[in-house]
Amino acid sequence: MAKFFEYQGKALFKKAGIPIPQGEAVKTPEEAREAAEKIAKPVVVKAQVWAGGRGKAGAVKFADTPEEARQAASEILGMEVKGLQVKEVLVEEKLNIDQEFYAGVIINSARDVRAPVLMFSPEGGMEIESVPEEKIAMMNVDVMRGLRPYDTLNMVRSMGLKGGSLRQLADITYKLFGVFRAYDCRTVEINPLVLTKEGKAIAADCRFQVDDQAIFRHPELGVKIGREFVKEPTEFDLIAWKFEEADFRGTSYVAEMAPPEELKKGGYVGYHGIGGGAAIMGVDALSKVGLKVADYADTSGNPTASKVYRVVKLILSQPGIEGYFLAGFMMANQEQWHHAHGIVKALREELPKRPGFPVVLLLCGNKEKESQQILKEGLADLPGRIEIYDREHVYDAKFLASRFKALVDEYRAEQGR
Ligand code: GDP
Ligand code: MN
């Protein structure tokens, strides 16, 4: 699911006519002070990360003056929330909360439902999973019939609301479903949906996630990678996505595991798995011998040689890495000569630049004999420490990792590291 920051989701709410607090996202404490000055009221300063539970993590702070807002921002910026670094904060007018509600839509893909589920609850502010069922009004929305304004009026009324609050909360819940549909969301939530002491309903928080498969329909959202990502993509991740974006032949999943400045400290190796489970097995084996992977890469589904070549080039572009490990821990049914060709081409370009560079290759499966021959002939004259393995070692993760470790140690000693 493509994720968005609270302030990005709120901007879409606003367009859809859902009231949101006045506010602004900023990147420095000084800008936070200026934003609070503009708002000219007590404010709340909120970490912008792809995670909820910021309140509990101390990443939502209140400030009565612009100076306090600057202070709060300086405490929150750079903080980690659920492993994610805070690079932006949202400075917003503080609401006088009278009551907190929940409104949300998710997709229930269970066989007997297969529909968006709209929910409204008077128990806002906490995670909806912990709210008892009888406190949630729920509706499976038939997408052919659509949602009608009276549906949300009925839902909100069933939770005991009346009068002006009923109308406002029902209207927001109705519009929320419109946002969900318009952007092909998987999830959209307002938690809390607030009723202020002044009697106004307003969306105090926002969670907005779009179906990866629909990203291409929404260039206006500016999503860079239409694929599940737990963190914001780095430059490395963005380059890797280019290999996939317009080429559906086989898959390559490549992600940065350590930032370039961390790699330079040493102890990292370039990593290339084939098939998800096998690739994870290889990472485990390497960490058991004390090697850290700079990247996680997986090429499978019969990728073309050109796709494999690009992946290997990208892996080898990582600064300071001390080896390249191909973890083909499977008798793959795909024709492995595509892998062999791509790897040979990339290593022929890269290894002459780094004499003695450790390379361990395990490649097994369909067209194995031919693939092995391509690797052996293609790499024979290169100046690396190269070891090539076949089906005899298909699940020998421990052995291969220890061979690789030995080569890396030699290389490090030679390099005086
Ligand atoms: P989350 O913890 O990441 O879901 O962040 P929220 O945006 O939901 O904020 C957490 C909690 O802070 C909310 O449930 C509210 O109780 C409180 N909060 C957030 N904004 C305001 C505000 O403007 N006024 C007041 N009084 N409380 C707020
Ligand atoms: Mn929340």
Image (tube, rainbow, N blue to C red):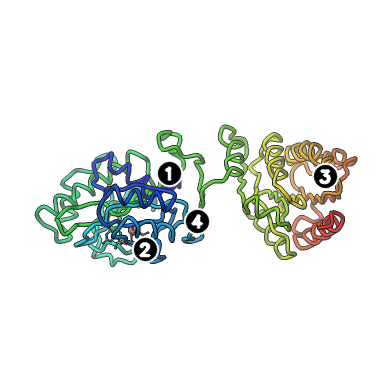
Cα separation, mark 4 vs mark 2, equals: 15 Å
Q: CA distance from mark 3 to mark 4?
A: 35 Å
Label 1 sits on residue: 211
Given the image, on which type of amino acid does mark 2 rest?
A: Gly
Helix, strand or loop for disc 3:
loop
Between 150 and 351, the one nearer to me in the picture? 351
Mark 4 or mark 2: whose residue is earlier in sequence: 2
Which residue in the structure is indicated by mark 2?
Answer: 55
**Mark 2 C-beta to ligand 1 under 8 Å:** yes
Q: Which residue is mark 3?
A: 354
Q: Is residue 359 left or right of residue 101?
A: right
| Distance CA(mark 2)–CA(mark 1) | 26 Å
Q: CA distance from mark 1 to mark 4?
A: 24 Å
Element type at mark 2: loop
Residue at position x 49%, y 41% from top?
226
Label 1 sits on a secondary structure element that is: loop
The residue positioned 82% from the left and 44% from the top of the image is 354
Q: Position of residue 304 (x, y in %)?
A: 68, 35
Residue 70 falls in image quadrant: bottom left
Residue in the image at 41% along x and 35% along y = 218
